[in-house]
Amino acid sequence: METKTFAELGLSQKVQAAITAAGYTNPTPIQAAAIPVAVTGRDVLGIAQTGTGKTASFVLPMITRLETGRARARMPRSLILAPTRELAAQVAQSFEKYGVNHKLDVALLIGGVSMDDQVRKLDRGVDVLIATPGRLLDHFQRGRLMLMGVEILVIDEADRMLDMGFIPDIEKICNLLPPRRQTLFFSATMPPEITRLVNQFLRDPERVEVARPATTAKTITQSFRFVSDGEDWVKREVLRDMIRSDNVKNAIIFCNRKRDVAILLKSLLKHGFNAGALHGDMDQKSRMETLDKFRNGDITLLAASDVAARGLDIPDVSHVFNFDLPWQSDDYVHRIGRTGRAGKEGIAQSIVTPDELKSLKDIEKMLGEPVAWIGESPTEQDFAESGKRRRGRGRGARPGAQRESGSRGRGERPAASSRPEHAAEARPGKGAREEGREQRRSEGRREGARTQAQPQPKAPRPEPQATKREERPAAAASQAPRPRPRPVDAEPAKAAVGAFAGNVPAFLRRPARPAKAAGE
Ligand code: AMP
């Protein structure tokens, strides 16, 4: 494929200057394909996901097109719909970055932040309104804004909106917009519901598709560490060992349950690590603060759950650790895609307990080759027993009490107060909270006692056999267990994403496991 330069895409001089200031030298494939179409005012159907540079592929032409014209009170000139607050906030940041040479008025309508300023902005008139669908409709229904001035509509991460039950809201919003508008529509996959939406609301769109990024970026070195004693405190020791013995600049450490994120954070802090946490029980403000601290290096380790970290663009992460193996192999790709981004080298290390060998098999199947172990690897017998074993710590059942937000089954329409953008703050019931507190208390006691009683001699660590991943073979991809069919996965890639191979959004969340933790 011929390589285009930013100068050839039809962007304004001021936008090009901002791109140079951002340090970008060449457009990514999605940018090279989508921008020349979008600047002309045509509709675009972009099939691409986070990590491909897709945000700039709509923000840059939008800024170029918005250079002419003026905003009127309560009538935004363009509207961007994003599934989550974090994504919406990131898109807003992109306008700051790429719009440095412009005086664009941008408003953000998302849950969890004070709305007074945003409403005042709306009253004065905004060029760009970025919103989550629920919040937007809320404001519309209160008469705080009118939508008939919208010239450009962007729908970002449409398939995630589908998973979150937002499609009826999207349809409602589209019907409130003037039919003569430009629509830029982005989705990582094209399930039938999304195709239907495209057929209904886009006019003769140019379809621009970039390859589903390699399952795992070529730049990520992956390894696994088998911990035959699956107790959490042992895992925490192993994790500390992994952090200390590798040159960790900064890392995200993933846990499957938000409660474990809190426990891990406490433990890391106790052991003198510079750590923070990101989980679904945190309010928006603390999430943003933590994320900022992590971005600017005030925090070097970030314990996180999938949902809290979903869709976040955190550049320059040197390591990803899986404290727990994710229950679904797609999430593995999504998690480790946080490192090795934009051509940088990254390291992903995962702890595997006997209980998790089944998940490990799924991951191997998806990757299409055996994983590389650091140290002792599990035996055939371990694998054989893992299928039969009743999951430790009462893991067999998976009640919803500790569910992360977003773990709803597909098609379950959440009540307004529990929609994902709100539900991120949903707290477990009192019982679960009490239990969590008790667990944290006892965890602190136990860990203190154990680390004193059992100092860990540092065994010499065998070198991990680096496995550099290539594109996910279609066959392996289709074998991977999927929560629902996603037809586009089976399609051949149209263009290489190259260094921008990023991560795969996780589409379905599993119910969390029961509250009892090991030995607690
Ligand atoms: P996105 O897919 O929009 O989440 O972007 C992924 C990352 O790539 C972000 O950190 C962007 O700042 C970065 N990025 C976007 N476009 C380019 C480019 N042309 N060159 C280098 N980095 C880029």
Image (cartoon, rainbow, N blue to C red):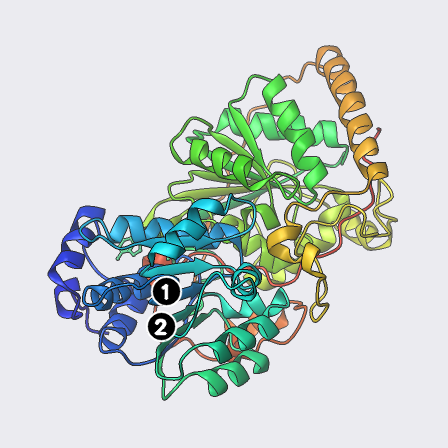
Classify 260 as above or below 400.
Answer: above
Marked residue nearer the N-terminal end (1 or 2) = 1
Left or right: 499 in relation to 165: left
Give the residue type that dot 1 points to.
Pro
Classify 486 as above or below 253.
Answer: below
* Mark-to-mark CA distance, 1 and 2: 6 Å
Q: Quadrant of the N terminus?
A: bottom left
- Name the residue at 49% across, 86% down: 200
What label does residue 475 carry, if any?
none
- Name the residue at 65% across, 68% down: 482
Viewer-proximal residue among 294 and 280: 280
Which residue was labeled with disc 2? Answer: 149
Image coords of residue 71 (percent x, y): 29, 63
Viewer-proximal residue among 194 and 82: 82
Q: Can residue 30 be seen in the rendering of this structure?
A: yes
How many residues crowd mark 1 within 10 Å: few (<14), some (14–19), many (20+)? many
Image coords of residue 491 (percent x, y): 48, 80
In which quadrant of this rendering is ligand 1 seen?
A: bottom left
Which quadrant of the figure has residue 286?
A: top right
- Name the residue at 48% across, 77% down: 176
Question: The residue tagged with tag 1: helix, strand or loop?
Answer: loop
Question: The residue tagged with tag 2: helix, strand or loop?
Answer: loop
Classify 449 as above or below 262.
Answer: above
- Name the residue at 72% across, 41% down: 353
Image coords of residue 500 (percent x, y): 35, 58
Q: Are marks 1 and 2 in contact (CB under 8 Å)?
A: yes
Count of residue discs: 2
How many residues crowd mark 2 within 10 Å: few (<14), some (14–19), many (20+)? some
Which residue was labeled with disc 1? Answer: 76
